[in-house]
Image (spheres, rainbow, N blue to C red):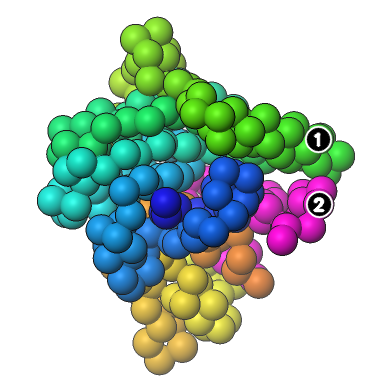
C-alpha cells in the first residue's frame, strides 16, 4: 500500500497520512511531484490517491499525472480521497472515472471537509476556533473511516450517480474552463523581495528566480502553496489580495506521529 498526494496548504497531506497511520502504519505517503513517485506506485498493489477538490473537479495536475502515466494503473486497486473547503460534489468520482479508463479498480472514495485554502478570497474564511473545530471533526471522521477500512468496508463518497449530478450542476459546468488545463492567472506584486521561497515550493516548477525577480511560466496547478507561504503576501491567483495564509499547521489540534 502506498499513498500519493497533491497538497498545497497541508490539508490533504495531513488527511492522507493520518488515514494511512490507522489503516496501515507501514504505508508511506509521497507527494505527487516527487522524483521516483511512479516507481513507488508500480511497487504497490493498493494506492491511496489524495488531492484537494477544485470547483468540484480533480486538479489538472493530478489528471495530467494519471494520463501521462496511464500504463501504471492497470490492475491497481485505488482509493480516492479529496479534501474540500465547502462542497465537493463528486470530487473523488472524477478521479475514479479517469483511473478506471486505464484499468484500475476503485476501492472507494472519501470526502473530508477542511479549512478553506483559497488565501485570496474572503468567501469561506472562518475564525480560528471554527477552523480548529473543522479539523477536529475531520480527524474524527478519518479515525472512523480508517477503522472501517481495516475491516474491509470502504466508503463510497462521490462515486454514485447522485453525487455525479451534484458535482456537475453545482460547480463543474459553470467553472469547467478553470480546470481544463494549468492556470496562467498567477500574479506577483511589487511587494515581492525575491527571496525565492515560492520557486522552491512550487510542485510544478512554474516559478523561476532570475536576477532577483520571480518569473511565471503559466503552468500553475492552483494548489495555493506559494500563496500560503509567501512572507510578503505578494502572490495572488483568484483574487487581488491575500486575506489569510491558510496553512494546516495553524489549525492543527493534535500532534502527528
Whether residue 145 is visible: yes
161 over 8 or under it: above or below: above
* Nearer to us in this view, 86 or 187: 86
Distance between the alpha carbons at the discs numbered 1 and 2: 12 Å
Image position, residue 56 (x, y; %):
42, 28
**On the image, which quarter does residue 125 sit in?**
top right
Image position, residue 220 (x, y; %):
36, 57
**Secondary element at image label 2:** loop
- The residue to which callout 1 is attached is 133
- The residue to which callout 2 is attached is 254
Task: Kindly give the residue lying farthest to the right in the view shown.
Answer: 129
Q: How many marks?
A: 2
The residue at 13%/51% (across/down) is 71
Q: Magenta includes 242?
A: yes
User: What's drawn in magenta, residue-wise?
Assistant: 232-257
**Disc 1 packing (10 Å; few <14; some 14–19; many ≥20):** some
51 over 245 or under it: above or below: above
**On the image, which quarter does residue 46 sit in?**
top left
The residue at 68%/53% (across/down) is 248
The residue at 41%/36% (across/down) is 80
Instruction: First in sequence, mark 1 or 2: give its number.
Output: 1
Image position, residue 59 (x, y; %):
36, 43
Image position, residue 32 (x, y; %):
38, 59
Whether residue 218 is visible: no
Q: Magenta includes 179?
A: no
Query: Main structural element of the magenta stretch: helix, strand or loop?
Result: loop
Name the side, left or right, on which 177 lies relative to 103.
right
Amino acid at each position: 500500500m502506498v499513498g500519493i498526494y497533491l497538497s498545497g496548504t497541508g490539508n490533504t497531506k495531513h488527511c492522507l497520512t493520518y488515514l494511512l497511520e490507522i489503516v496501515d502504519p507501514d504505508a508511506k505517503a509521497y507527494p505527487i511531484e516527487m522524483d521516483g513517485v511512479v516507481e513507488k506506485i508500480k511497487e504497490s498493489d493498493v494506492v491511496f490517491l489524495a488531492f484537494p477538490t477544485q470547483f468540484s473537479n480533480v486538479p489538472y495536475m493530478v489528471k495530467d499525472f494519471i494520463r501521462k502515466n496511464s500504463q501504471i494503473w492497470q490492475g491497481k486497486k485505488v482509493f480516492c480521497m479529496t479534501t474540500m473547503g465547502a462542497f465537493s460534489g463528486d470530487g473523488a468520482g472524477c478521479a475514479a472515472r479517469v483511473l478506471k479508463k486505464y484499468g484500475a479498480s476503485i476501492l472507494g472514495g472519501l470526502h473530508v471537509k477542511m479549512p478553506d485554502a483559497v488565501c485570496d478570497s474572503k468567501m469561506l474564511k472562518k475564525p480560528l476556533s471554527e477552523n480548529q473545530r473543522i479539523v477536529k471533526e475531520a480527524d474524527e471522521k478519518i479515525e472512523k473511516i480508517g477503522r472501517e477500512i481495516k475491516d474491509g468496508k470502504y466508503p463510497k463518497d462521490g462515486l454514485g450517480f447522485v453525487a455525479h449530478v451534484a458535482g456537475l450542476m453545482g460547480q463543474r459546468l459553470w467553472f469547467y474552463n478553470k480546470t481544463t488545463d494549468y492556470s496562467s492567472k498567477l500574479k506577483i506584486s511589487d511587494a515581492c523581495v525575491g527571496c525565492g521561497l515560492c520557486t522552491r515550493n512550487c510542485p510544478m516548477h512554474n516559478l523561476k528566480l532570475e536576477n532577483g525577480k520571480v518569473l511565471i511560466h503559466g503552468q500553475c496547478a492552483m494548489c495555493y502553496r506559494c500563496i500560503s507561504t509567501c512572507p510578503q503576501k505578494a502572490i495572488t491567483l483568484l483574487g487581488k489580495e491575500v486575506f489569510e495564509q491558510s496553512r494546516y499547521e495553524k489549525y492543527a489540534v493534535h500532534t502527528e506521529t
